[in-house]
Amino acid sequence: MIRIGVLGCGYFGAEFARAVKEMKGIQLAAVYSPGKSSERLSSELGCPRSSSVNEIMENADIDAVIIATPNYLHHQHVLAAAEAGKHIFCEKPFALDAGEAAEMVEACRKAKVTLMVGHIMHFYHGIARVQAMIQEGFFGDILTMHIERTGWEQKKPDVSWKKMQEKSGGHLFHHIHEIDIMQWIMGVPTEMYGAGGNLGHRSAEFGDEDDVLLLTASFGGNAFATLQYGSGFRVGNHFIRINGTKAGAVIDFKHAEVRVVSDAGETVFPLFEDEKSAAAICELFARTDGGISYGSPEERPPEYILVSLRKELELFLHVLNGGDIPEDKKDLFDGSSAVHSVQIAQMGCNAVQRHGSRPV
């Protein structure tokens, strides 16, 4: 029986705790969050509530931890867990600095603990299928990729830490999923150029993150990518477009489908294997700018997140029990997906600082 401690009881952490509680072969040993969310979750699930991070780390009966704390705390919590000999599942973004990300991976390697990063889009059926097609050579050489994750932020009663650049890292870090897919397919750019800033949400009631980010990435001059991120777009969208020498694809999150075009014709297949997940993401976009939306501890994630989250947890448990890591998921365990995604997000932020409206 593997005993799990959950750090962070917000939007994702609470859901991980619920999933652990429901699964066989695993026990929810403790939850911790400094606010009232951990009290509510402890009462809901009938599990112990730890009084501090240290209490979880010092508990010899806890084998592994799920780290779903605010982004800026991941570095210290992963290092503490590695030092304590706990296996680690860390939510995205892994860190807010590439150097710190590398330090975290090395600490886990030295401690000989399993590390998995929570890059949930690796578990989207349609994305995994496109990646497999690329690996098989169906697309030929990848020439370009365009990522768009945009929308318009409305005023909310409170300003979350997720809207504060120093704590969340801003859109490129907090919404790092598409950057992760870019590095999965194309690797790490050699250069990035960009412009951006906080253009449409400059009052304190919106936080201080940049709401318009326009980036170009070069992969040694042999391939290019463009990225549009932010909550300053009245006409928003959410998709990834890939073009190769033999085929191209659009991963369309708003309509939960993937369209592949080649000389042989056009093929359309679902982004998710189950209809409930597809309906959930389409409904999200129908009522809000889903590409830039943020969850809160009082909300439950939509079905497509719940299904993929449980797949992540099942794989983590499988590996902890001595199971093999699937070939297409190895980068989630060897640190490369974690470090490379953080590295690219940091390159993008630096590019905006050099050429955008945010002061250096």
Image: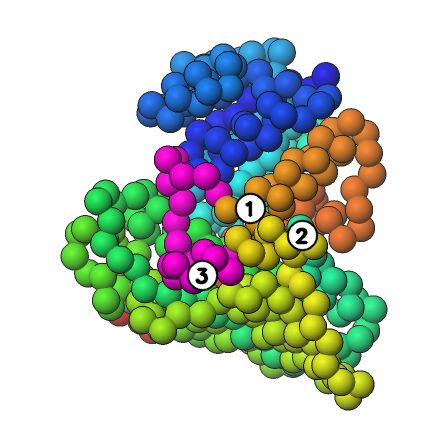
Give the percent coordinates (x, y) of residue 84: 58, 20
Q: Is residue 34 magenta?
A: no
**Which residue is more in the foreground, 131 or 265?**
265
Q: Residue at x 52, y 14 (%)?
A: 47
Can you say whether 35 is above or below 129 in the image? Answer: above
Judge left or right: residue 233 versus residue 276. left
Picture quarter with the N terminus: top right
**Which residue is more in the foreground, 203 or 39?**
39
Residue 43: name its quadrant: top left
The range drawn in magenta is 281-301
Judge left or right: residue 43 versus residue 243. left
Comes first in the chain, label 2 or label 3: 2
Disc 3: which residue: 285
Q: Secondary structure at mark 3?
A: helix
**What kind of residue is marked 2?**
Asp
Q: Is residue 296 magenta?
A: yes
Give the percent coordinates (x, y) of residue 25: 73, 21
Disc 1: which residue: 303
Give the percent coordinates (x, y) of residue 42: 45, 18
Residue density around tag 2, few if under 14, some if 14–19, many if 20 or more, within 10 Å: few
Query: How far apart, in angstroms, are the residues tagged by discs 1 and 3?
Result: 13 Å
Residue 66: name its quadrant: top right
Which residue is farthest left?
203
Which residue is farthest bottom?
263
Q: Which mark is residue 274?
A: 2
